[in-house]
Amino acid sequence: MILSPQDVRDMALGAAVLGAGGGGDPYIGMLMAIQAIEKGKKVELVDPDTVDDDDFIVPVAMMGTPTVLIEKIPGGDEVIWVLRSIEKYYGKEARYVTQIEAGGVNSMIPIVAAAYTGKPLLNGDGMGRAFPELQMVTFHLIGVKATPMVLSDERGNSVVLDTIDNFWAEKIARAITIKFGGSAYIAIYAMNGKNYRRGVVKYTPSLAVELGRTIREAKRRGVNVFDAILDVAKGFMIFRGKIVDVARFNLGGFARGEMVIEGFDEYRNSKMVIRFQNENLVAIKDGEIIASTPDIISVLDLESARPITTERLRYGLRVAVIGIPCDSKWRTEEGIKTVGPRYFGYDVDYVPIEVRVKKV
């Protein structure tokens, strides 16, 4: 599949739905990717099952606080710098680039890298959604090291980082990112094709394209957009209402906080609180958790059905909250240990959203 400008627009929209409020706003990244394709660059989306065991595969992304990404407009060369730097470190060229997460800008950055380097983009990622920390990747679950990794900023500063484990990679890379001004471009979890096939969440990019196209076509046909989204994503409507409060602050390189939503229609007289750390982590309806990480909690504008990333939340928005089951890799013992609610400090066990919804 060769990505068209419309495919990129659809992917940006769909990936933001899957991103659970995180991954950064996709708009700037989408413009960069479309500009590259309109210059005649081709991006081929390739099935992950076709990679050879010895192929060298490099995920590229941005890390940092999403609110900072709004203010620090990228030039477009940064992602190429980090890719070339990690190739130089390993002494070999990447055969493919890939997404590390589905969500906002990080669904777009690998397209830019693929377009300007001529490398195919693999139809998979390492999360099936977005998560805030570097070790929260399915490749981590199978023992792939995040490092050696390369971080770069918009000034041309670069750092090669090698750590004893992926948790130290998160701590040190986060500190460097803060020194870079709150955001960095990264090449991370470089691996061979055999490990990629074992750890990848397959077909997340094409699912994002399908979701974006579904939203666009549902609007054109005048049908219920939310029903169409939930049908494709196999998700659940869990709340509708108006945002009446947003508390947000930057701490430790993350955008943290919570939103309060007052319900209307069938949710009248109910209240929902959603807490986030870059991504939405738990949704609490009338004091009871109704959805939690690693399942996807996505907040959509009630009028346009466009997903609202956590840095774009504000008082007065009328929203729908949907929940989408996560990939099965996150529902393993190691997956829940890595990204479940207890990791983030919530004293509750993970319960799949389809089970929680049935109890309500």
Image (cartoon, helix red, strand yellow):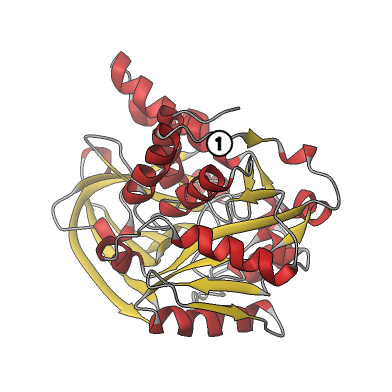
Using the rendered view, name the quadrant where residue 149 is placed.
bottom right
**Above or below 304: residue 340:** below
Q: Is residue 231 visible?
A: yes
Residue furthest to the top in view is: 221
Residue furthest to the left in view is: 316
In percent of width and height, residue 39 lies at 41, 35
113 sits left or right of 253 in the view: right
Q: Residues within 10 Å of mark 1 (few under 14, many from 20)?
A: many
**Above or below 40: residue 193:** below
333 sits left or right of 156 in the view: right
111 sits left or right of 287 in the view: right
The kind of residue on which mark 1 rests is Val
Given residues 260 and 89, the one toward you in this image is 89
Residue furthest to the right in view is: 53
Which residue is painted at 23% across and 71% down in the image? Answer: 247
Which residue is painted at 53% across and 71% down in the image? Answer: 133
Instruction: Label 1: state its secondary structure.
Output: loop
In percent of width and height, residue 209 lies at 49, 33
**Above or below 125: residue 160:** below
In percent of width and height, residue 255 lies at 34, 71
The residue under label 1 is: 43
